[in-house]
């Protein structure tokens, strides 16, 4: 399950930088399904419910740990990230770009839509993605990956900019791109 969540996080990080977006506080809502393991959707729902019902002290500690990595929690398990102005200007969806354990290949752009292949090391998986920039404050990503460990993994992400002010969240530090 941890590997699956790491894979989703890598795709989210990728999608967050999809084109010219506005900097600020963004919220990412994900839906991940594994047809070979229908229990995963129930586990994700249970995990979101547990997060909502954490005791205040535990929630505060978790929020502080996440903030240390430039992330926050939103409603219903959404992930919040601060996108800095420099990152918002970049166009990292390009052939050979690596985000976490995932590398993008066969990248093509048509208007406001990017398509291509995604190959990940952990868990070992590969598949296709499509990212559509609906506006400078909203985009969506769909990915269909296959892994020997998990079978097919379908992921949908919807991202919306909440505000120009990131509050206490600092922009996520991006590792240097591997070329």
Image: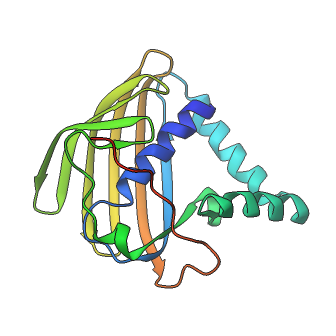
Q: Going 82% across and 60% down the picture, which residue do you hit?
A: 61
Query: Is residue 127 positioned above or below 49 on the image?
Result: above
Residue at left offset 49%, top offset 52% = 30
Q: Where is residue 143 in the image (x, y as percent from the top left)?
A: 34, 41
The C terminus sits in image quarter: top left
Q: Is residue 116 visible?
A: yes
Image quadrant of residue 39?
top right
Determine the residue located farthest toward the top in the rendered image.
148
Q: Is residue 120 above or below residue 57?
A: above
Looking at the figure, which quarter contains the N terminus?
top right
The percent position of residue 21, horizontal first and vertical second, equals: 31, 72
Q: Which residue lies furthest to the left in this view?
A: 110
Is residue 55 rendered to the left or right of residue 160?
right
Count of marks, rendered view: 0
Q: Position of residue 116 (x, y in %)?
A: 20, 40
Residue 154 shown left or right of residue 63 in the figure: left
Let me know if residue 55 appears in the view.
no
Residue 133 vs residue 123, the one in the foreground: 123
Pick the front one: 79 or 156: 79
Colour style of the rendered protein structure: rainbow
115 to 75, vertically: above or below: above
Q: Which residue is drawn at 33% across and 64% down?
A: 139
Question: Who's the residue at 60% across and 62% down the image?
Answer: 71
Horizontally, is 134 left or right of 12 in the view? left
In which image quadrant can residue 75 be found? bottom right
Q: Where is residue 3 in the image (x, y as percent from the top left)?
A: 57, 31
- Which quarter of the figure has residue 101? top left
């Amino acid at each position: 399950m941890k590997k699956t969540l790491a894979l989703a996080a890598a795709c989210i990080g990728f999608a967050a930088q999809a084109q010219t977006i506005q900097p600020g506080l963004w919220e990412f809502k994900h839906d991940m399904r594994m047809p070979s393991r229908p229990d995963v959707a129930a586990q994700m729902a249970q995990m979101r419910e547990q997060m909502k019902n954490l005791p205040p002290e535990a929630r505060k500690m978790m929020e502080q740990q996440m903030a240390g990595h430039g992330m926050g929690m939103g409603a219903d398990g959404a992930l919040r990230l601060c996108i800095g102005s420099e990152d918002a200007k970049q166009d990292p969806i390009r052939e050979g770009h690596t985000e976490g354990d995932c590398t993008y290949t066969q990248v093509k752009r048509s208007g406001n839509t990017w398509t291509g292949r995604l190959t990940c090391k952990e868990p070992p998986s590969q598949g296709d993605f499509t990212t559509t920039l609906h506006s400078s404050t909203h985009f969506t990503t769909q990915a269909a990956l296959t892994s020997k460990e998990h079978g097919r993994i379908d992921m949908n992400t919807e991202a919306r900019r909440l505000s120009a002010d990131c509050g206490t969240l600092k922009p996520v530090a991006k590792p240097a791109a591997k070329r």
